[in-house]
Amino acid sequence: MEVQTAQDRIDHLIREINRHNYQYYMLDNPTISDYDFDQLLQELIDLEAAHPELKRPDSPTQRVGGEVTKRFESAAHLYPMQSLGNTYSQEDLGEFDRRVRELLAEPPAYVCELKYDGVAISLIYENGLLVRAVTRGDGTRGDVVTANVRTIPTVPLQLQGDYPPLIEVRGEIIMPFSSFEQLNAEREEIGEAPFANPRNAASGSLKLQDSSEVAKRGLDFKLYFALGEQLPENNHFDRLLKLHEWGFRKPDVMEKVADLQGVYDFLHNWDEKRKTLPYPIDGVVIKVNDFEQQRQVGATAKSPRWAIAYKFKADRVSTKLLSVDFQVGRTGIITPVANLSPVSLAGTVVKRATLNNADFMAEMDIREGDSLFVEKGGEIIPKIVAVDYEKRLPDARPVPFITHCSVCGTELQQAEGEAGIFCPNSDHCAPQIKGRLEHFIARKAMNIDSLGEGKIDMLYANGLVKNIADLYSLTYEQLFGLEKVIEDEEGKTKTLSFREKTVQNILSGIEASKQVPFERVLFALGIRFVGEVTAKKLARHFKTMDAVANAPIEELTTVEDVGERVAQSITAYFNDTDNLEILMRLREAGLQFELSQSQSQPASDALAGKSIVVSGVFTVPRDTIKELVERHGGKNVSSISKNTSFVLAGEKMGPEKRKKAEALGIPIISEEEFKAMIGEN
């Protein structure tokens, strides 16, 4: 390659890598997959090796990471936090093993560990006490997030045993899949965009200003290294076991192997088994075990030569972008969604994938007729990760983000302090109105299961409902005979018709909803940022709708889970005259606007301090069982862990949950045993 051509390519690569580093480290919003980033970095390394005279002092190859955010106090690391070299091939592992052996007199043993997909953290302990937690930052300095890290149960606050006076412990802050799913469900409930993957969610959680909010995120700490003067043990494997004696949870998976074949066996085993893990990983880390051998092998300015990360390739396909829809959510937020040529990916057929927001589309430079790479590796849902530039048409034009609502035509606005663009026409924009109606009738809200999205659409189209209070004014005469022709996914049409039984079921369901408890009525209103759990805590604190409506912001923020933003949203809702009119009509219809006597007082403390997983089918609705758990002092949790007190199992309990409970030795009790426990037999 000619010098000028190489110079131009190096300049381009540096700009691209710095841009992606900024997106990843500063904005917590990566726009490229790990594999593609590593390919760009490797190309730059190769070019600089071929043309050392062109190496720039500001090249990303001379740095460990990105810039440090200014939102938190920064601190210097006691020891630089280097990054690991990455590989995606076993051939590269063989080359790594060859280089290591050439530098040693004796063959090395290796330690294989899982490569957690989270946020690297450094924990400093002085005299056994956690005094500082620092993110990786640029490898030299990082952000001090001690208050947030203290909330993570798997991070010891005080060591035990014969610990040294000063030690730095390194590991990864991760978000388990169960916590991730719960967090995204809560964000969607309150009208916020879900996180794309657990890594982004963990990173965003560590940067929250309120540590009490961090405590609710279900973060976990995974240990992988320790540094300090005169630490015990002369090898990595035994030192991690020693850290377990001092109070850390030892790695779930850690294996010492004698040679490269042992490394290959470990990789083959976990390439498939990783899909069963309850938390995200993206590869395996291989380390020389003996510390003296590590010293002999040495390190570069960027990475240790005695360790390497083998990354699993995420399932990825390229498929054609057919069109982009701009969906309007119930809070007005506009979400662009890519319609894709159907393609099989990790066992499912993918037809659509979110494009997140306007910034994502611009950053990705998505153009009409492009083919897009879609991945489903550590992601919970399919994710667009890159454009397949080889298939781009020469005259392809960028896909523009709409300036006016795709439904009502109202000019869109930028959400203050957020990345979202929204339609402000909340009272007259059909998707927002129907979204609020669908939220109101949902199972966890008013539970009017005789209605659904299709029937709500019919009622709205016929002008019978324009807000949630209109549901309670519906009559048999209005409903009987309504019809709508609908088309299924295969293009076949059928007629949805309201006949006598359908109408009776709808009216009966609406009438039955008048007995839904106050806390679910409060949730059903759809107040922004007020999810199911927050509504329950507000209801139990204030007891009545009037008390919530009249509470000043200062009093609202005394309720657990209610911060300044949530309190302001609640106040704004109850200050709106249209909302007050709807509430008056709901009150007149007979909905529950205060806690019943039985809800106001706990039934007992028989389950106090117990975390309980409910699974299966019972003689009463599952929500009733969960309510009994809470009324008797227990806590409902969604996933099984070693901290689960017991599993309450009905018929058809999930086989995977049963298997996990048995593996962890968690008791499984029946509905009859549970009722005896709380004295309701």
Image (cartoon, helix red, strand yellow):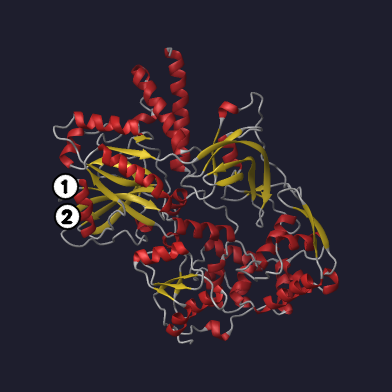
> Could you tell whether 158 is left or right of 457 in the image?
left
| Earlier-in-chain disc, 1 versus 2 | 2
Q: Quadrant of residue 401?
A: top right
- Residue occupying the point 57% across, 61% down: 529
- Quadrant assignment for the N terminus: top left
Residue beneath label 2, please? Answer: 164
Label 2 secondary element: loop
Any mark on residue 229, and which?
1
- Residue occupying the point 39% across, 42% down: 68
Residue 122 visible (yes or no): no
Tell me if label 1 and label 2 are in contact, CB under 8 Å: yes
Residue 375 visible (yes or no): yes
Q: Position of residue 334 (x, y in %)?
A: 65, 49
Q: Position of residue 504 (x, y in %)?
A: 77, 74
Q: Nearer the viewer, residue 371 or 350?
A: 350
Label 1 secondary element: loop
Q: Amino acid at mark 1?
A: Glu
Q: Amino acid at mark 2?
A: Pro
